[in-house]
Amino acid sequence: MKILIATGNKHKFKEIMDLLPRKTKTGEKIEYVSLEDIGGLKLPAETGQTLTENAEIKAIYAAQESGLPAISDDTGLEVEFLDGKPGVHTARYAGEHADAAENNRKLLNELEGLFLGKRAARFRTVACLATPQGKVVSFEGALDGFIGFGYRGENGFGYDPIFIVAGTRKTLAEMTEKEKNAISHRGQAFKQLAAHLQVVGK
């Protein structure tokens, strides 16, 4: 069985693949392919109003276009002081073509002068699996924490270097991949999806 992981982000592709099973409970092998593997399929714009809508838009499109079951996700960073922003605009907070460094700078500037207790935030991920036949299932994970005062750590991507995990003194970027996957919002969502894949096998 082949499943398409519908993301153009190589870091995210590896992180997702590490969380998914290689076999179903009946022993059927699962092979994961990338957008590049199927000719560089371009995903549609994230025009949804919620993380679930965005994840479904990408997964449904990828499944229909590729003829394969497709997995996609959308992640939002919700900062309490900013009334839940950047939310669905997390990936493009500093502009449509902004990179991670620009997004991080904008967020740090907006929280400048606030003490840590006022910098509470939550990561949420919705992981979606869609089939070419139109079946769609979604799973959600969340991780609480705080926005730090600068960059710490060399691992991860996106906002990981400035997100301090609640109950620890580490940013996500200071954690090993194993540590991060054990607690992260994406890890939680994809572990649920993984359990679903193992049971249904399709």
Image (cartoon, rainbow, N blue to C red):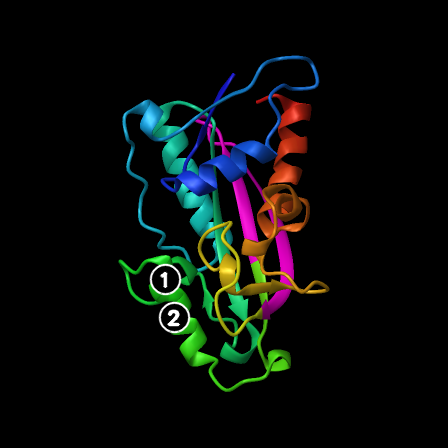
- In the picture, measured across the screen, residue 115 lies left or right of residue 57, that is right
Vertical relation: 45 (above or below) 137: below
- Residue 121, image x, y percentages: 58, 69
Q: How many marks can you see? A: 2
- In the picture, measured across the screen, residue 187 lies left or right of residue 3, that is right
Residue at coordinates 57% horizontally, 22% vertically from top-left? 202
- Residue 163, image x, y percentages: 55, 63
**124 or 176: nearer the eye?**
176
Q: Quadrant of residue 169?
A: bottom right
**Amino acid type, label 1:** Ala
Residue at coordinates 54% horizontally, 85% vertically from top-left? 114
SS state under label 1:
helix
Residue 136 appears in the picture as rendered: no
Vertical relation: 4 (above or below) 97: above
**49 or 3: nearer the eye?**
3
Query: CA gap, disc 1 to disc 2?
Result: 6 Å
- In the picture, measured across the screen, residue 22 lies left or right of residue 71, that is right
Read off the magenta span: 124-146
**131 or 19: nearer the eye?**
19
155 in magenta? no
**Label 1: how many Cα within 10 Å (few below 14, some 14–19, many 20+):** few
Residue at coordinates 31% horizontally, 44% vertically from top-left? 44
**Amino acid type, label 2:** Arg
- Residue 43, image x, y percentages: 32, 40
Q: Quadrant of residue 6?
A: top left
According to the picture, the residue beneath numbered tag 1 turns out to be 101
Vertical relation: 66 (above or below) 125: above
Tags 1 and 2 touching, CB below 8 Å: yes
SS state under label 2:
helix
131 in magenta? yes
According to the picture, the residue beneath numbered tag 2 turns out to be 105
* Chief SS of the magenta region: strand
